[in-house]
Image (spheres, rainbow, N blue to C red):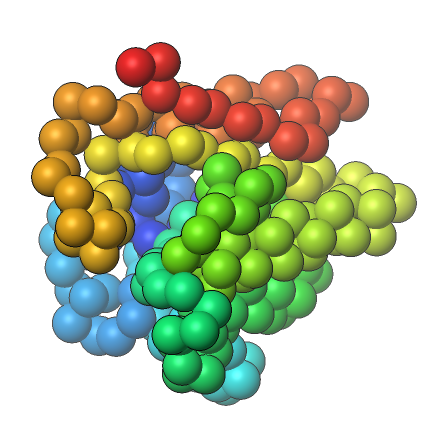
C-alpha cells in the first residue's frame, strides 16, 4: 500500500486520480485550500486525510504545514491543481499573471521542497500534471502557458537534482479534458462546450497511474496524451 499526496482532488483529473487510488486501497492525503474544502474531501473520500493551505499564497505553505500532522511516509506527490485565465498580453494585469504563476508553478515548487525529505526516504515519485500549453503557447494563453512552461522547467531540473536520491519525476501533458476548468476555458473563449469532444479525466488518471506503477529501475519522464477526435 502506497501513500500519496494529491492537490486538486476536488474535481476533474485530481478527483479521478484520487478515486482510482482509493479503489486499490492506497492511503490518500488530499490538499485543500481551506477547512471547508477539507471537510468536503474527507466526506467524498472516506479514510482519506487532508492537508490545508492556500496554493495562491505559496509563501505561507511552510507555515501551514508546520501546524499540521504530516504523513509519516510519502510514496508520491501528485501536483494536479491549477488555474487558468485567458487574455492577450496587452490585456492581462499583473494580478492575473501572479495568480496563475503562484498556483501553477510556485506552489508546486514550494510543496515539493517541503516534502522532499519524505520522498527521498521512500525513493518516491513526483508527478506534475502539466498541459499541452506547457509545450506550445497559443494566442490568449500567454500567462497560463508561461506558468506551464515553467512547470516543465521545474520538473526537468528536479529530475536531474534528485536522481542521486532515487526520486522519479514525471510530467504529463494532457490535451483538452472534460473538466470544470475546461468549461471555464470555453466560457472565456466564447465557445459552446461539448464534453464528448474531449478526453475524460479518467483517461488522464490512467496515464498518471501508468507512470506510477512502472517497476523500480524504470522511469517515464514525459507523457503527452491527446483526444482522438
At horizontal 24% and vertical 44% (from top left) the residue drawn is 182
Compared across the picture, whether 125 is left or right of 7 comes to: right
Which x, y percent locates residue 133?
50, 45
At horizontal 74% and vertical 46% (from top left) the residue drawn is 156
Kindly indicate the quadrant of the structure image that contains residue 219: top right
Which x, y percent locates residue 163?
83, 43
Compared across the picture, whether 127 is left or right of 99 comes to: right
Visible residue check, residue 229: yes
Which x, y percent locates residue 97?
46, 74
> Is residue 39 shown above or below 137?
below
At horizontal 48% and vertical 47% (from top left) the residue drawn is 138
- Foreground of the two, 38 or 15: 15
Compared across the picture, whether 131 is left or right of 221 comes to: left
Residue located farthest toward the right when viewing the structure as drawn: 164
Kindly indicate the quadrant of the structure image that contains residue 69: bottom left
Kindly indicate the quadrant of the structure image that contains residue 166: top right
Visible residue check, residue 24: no
Q: Give the number of callouts.
A: 0
At horizontal 32% and vertical 39% (from top left) the residue drawn is 13
Q: In which quarter of the image is the C terminus?
A: top left
Which x, y percent locates residue 158?
75, 52
> Is residue 226 shown above or below 18?
above
Residue located farthest toward the top when viewing the structure as drawn: 228
Amino acid at each position: 500500500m502506497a501513500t500519496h499526496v494529491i492537490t486538486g482532488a476536488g474535481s476533474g483529473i485530481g478527483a479521478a486520480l484520487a478515486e482510482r487510488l482509493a479503489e486499490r486501497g492506497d492511503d490518500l492525503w488530499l490538499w485543500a485550500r481551506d477547512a471547508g474544502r477539507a471537510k468536503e474531501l474527507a466526506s467524498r473520500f472516506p479514510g482519506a486525510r487532508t492537508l490545508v493551505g492556500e496554493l495562491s499564497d505559496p509563501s505561507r505553505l511552510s507555515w501551514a504545514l508546520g501546524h499540521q500532522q504530516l504523513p509519516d511516509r510519502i510514496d508520491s506527490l501528485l501536483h494536479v491543481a491549477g488555474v487558468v485565465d485567458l487574455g492577450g498580453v496587452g490585456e492581462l494585469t499583473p494580478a492575473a499573471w501572479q495568480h496563475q504563476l503562484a498556483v501553477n508553478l510556485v506552489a508546486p515548487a514550494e510543496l515539493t521542497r517541503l516534502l522532499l525529505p519524505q520522498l527521498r526516504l521512500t525513493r518516491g515519485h513526483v508527478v506534475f500534471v502539466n498541459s499541452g500549453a506547457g509545450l506550445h503557447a497559443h494566442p490568449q494563453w500567454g500567462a497560463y502557458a508561461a506558468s506551464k512552461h515553467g512547470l516543465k522547467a521545474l520538473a526537468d531540473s528536479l529530475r536531474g537534482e534528485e536522481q542521486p536520491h532515487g526520486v522519479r519525476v514525471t510530467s504529463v501533458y494532457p490535451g483538452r479534458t472534460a473538466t470544470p476548468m475546461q468549461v471555464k476555458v470555453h466560457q472565456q473563449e466564447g465557445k459552446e462546450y461539448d464534453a464528448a469532444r474531449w478526453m475524460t479525466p479518467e483517461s488522464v488518471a490512467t496515464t498518471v497511474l501508468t507512470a506510477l506503477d512502472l517497476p523500480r529501475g524504470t522511469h517515464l519522464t514525459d507523457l503527452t496524451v491527446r483526444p482522438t477526435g
